[in-house]
Each structure stands twice: as structure tokens, then as C-alpha cells.
Image (tube, rainbow, N blue to C red):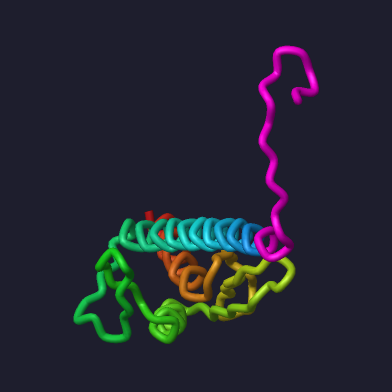
Amino acid sequence: SPEFPGQRPVLRRTLSIQEELSALAEITQTCCDAAVAQRKMVRTMGFEYAIDKLYGTGWLPGDGAECDRHADGRQYPSIARVQREFAEMGHKLSVRYVELFDCYRAEWRDDEGTAKGAVVGQSEAEAVVYALAQLRRQLQVAVA
């Protein structure tokens, strides 16, 4: 019988504990899958941005030595190549994982040890690629 006048009767079925647990597991998995997909999208977008900025400085992969390939097909320098390019430009690059924020911080210093810049990224590769883009931009501005 309806609880309120004019309300249609509601048919109720009691779920077993197993059915409730199964439904809860399905909801939890769906939420987890969505969160993982969103995190991957954010990481990809940030890495794509870093690669865009690097290419925007005129960087080219050359013969592709010491390069990795992004999912979109573009090449980007490996971490070892970025370290080498920093050294060739008179800078030292250091990268560390920041657990509190679940990210990587790349910082560079000149030969005298003076801090010249820092960036963060969701992955080590993203951080170093973006750092190289920033250093190249700094050096282009300094020359102009």
C-alpha cells in the first residue's frame, strides 16, 4: 500500500548480501576505471604540452638517437639525452620525485650552482622534457 495518498505502490525486493556485495564491487570498479582513465588523460595532456613547448623552441629529434616516441607519433628526447643537452648548454639538471604531490620536480643550475629554473611533471620524462623546453626558451630570450 502507498505511504502517501496518490503514490503508486513500490515493489520492493530484498537483495541478498551476495547481490549487494556484487553491486558494490561493480560500482567501485566503474569508479576506479573512470579515475584511472581521467588520470591517464591528465598525464597525457601534460606530456603533450611539454612536447609542444619543446618543439616550439625549434628542437628537432635529428637522427632520432636517444629519443622515445609518444603515443601521438612525435619523438622526444630520452632522459639521458636531456641530461646531456643540459650539460652541453652549461647547466646541470636534477630530478626528484615529490611523494607528497605525486609528481616529479626537475631543477637546473648553471655552472656556478645558481638555480636557474624548475618545473614539475606527472612523470620523470614529462618533467625533463618540459625542463629542456624551458631552458631552451630562457637561452633564446637571453640571446635576443
Image quarter where the N terminus lies is top right
Judging depth in this view, the residue of 86 and 61 nearest the camera is 61
Q: Which residues are magenta?
A: 1-21
Q: Position of residue 49 (x, y in %)?
A: 41, 56
Residue 35 versus residue 132 in the image, above or below = above
Give the residue displayed 76% in from the left and 13% down from the top.
Answer: 5
Q: Position of residue 133 (x, y in %)?
A: 42, 64
Question: In this view, which residue lies farthest toward the front?
Answer: 1
Judging depth in this view, the residue of 78 and 140 nearest the camera is 78
Q: Quadrant location of residue 66? A: bottom left
Q: In the displayed structure, does residue 103 sit left or right of residue 4?
A: left
Q: Position of residue 31 (x, y in %)?
A: 59, 56
Q: Quadrant location of residue 82? A: bottom left
Judging depth in this view, the residue of 82 and 137 nearest the camera is 82
Residue 88 versus residue 138 in the image, above or below = below
Q: Position of residue 72 (x, y in %)?
A: 28, 64
Give the residue displayed 25% in from the left and 69% down from the top.
Answer: 60
